[in-house]
Image (spheres, grey):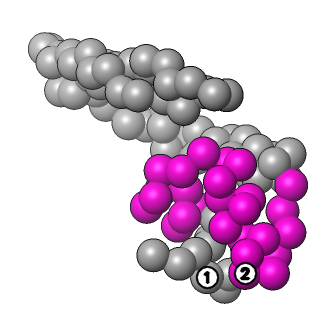
Amino acid sequence: MSCRVVGQVPAFWRCCCSTAQPLNRQAERFATEGVPLSLSTLADQVGAATAALMPLFKLVEAHVMAASRLHGDDTTVPVLAKGRTDTGRLWVLCA
């Protein structure tokens, strides 16, 4: 699946979410399509999107935490680190 550049931010997020690739690999993919993006630029985009989505997160958090009962899940996932794979954890709570 190619990450076409049709407006850099939407294309970046489409790649980020659909391919689950680390930022360094995404930078390489964009470079092959003629769009040089540094890791710091991509990281800035992640931070900006996180800040923009925080109000939505707060609404979902308030809804879930207001429930009388919660279900929790702890899932381990492989996380690519420099030269090795670490174990990451995803914690999910749902009402």
Secondary structure at numbered mark 2: loop
Residue 76 lies left or right of residue 11; in this view the side is left
Q: Quadrant of residue 89?
A: top left
Considering only vertical position in the picture, is 48 above or below 67? below
Kindly identify the amino acid type of the residue bearing the numbered disc 1. Answer: Arg
Q: 85 and 30: which one is in front? A: 85
Quarter of the picture holding the N terminus: bottom left
Q: 82 and 42: which one is in front? A: 82
Task: List x then y, in percent, for residue 53.
Answer: 58, 47
Task: List x then y, in percent, for residue 42.
Answer: 76, 52
**Mark 1 or 2: the one toward you:** 2
Residue located at (52% from left, 67% from top): 14
Considering only vertical position in the picture, is 58 above or below 29? above
In the picture of the structure, the residue carrying the numbered disc 2 is 33
Residue 9 in view (yes/no) = no
Kindly identify the amino acid type of the residue bearing the numbered disc 2. Answer: Glu
Task: List x then y, in percent, for residue 34.
Answer: 81, 81
Q: Quadrant of residue 28?
A: bottom right
Residue located at (55% from left, 56% from top): 16
Secondary structure at numbered mark 1: loop
Residue 39 lies left or right of residue 55; in this view the side is right
Q: Which residues are magenta?
A: 13-38
Considering only vertical position in the picture, is 28 above or below 35? above
Residue 70 circle label: none
Task: List x then y, in percent, for residue 45.
Answer: 75, 52
Quarter of the picture holding the C terminus: top left
Residue located at (56% from left, 24% from top): 84
In the picture of the structure, the residue carrying the numbered disc 1 is 4
Considering only vertical position in the picture, is 68 above or below 31? above
Instruction: Find the distance from the CA under tag 1 to the CA under tag 2.
Output: 8 Å
Are discs 1 and 2 less than 8 Å apart at CB? Answer: yes
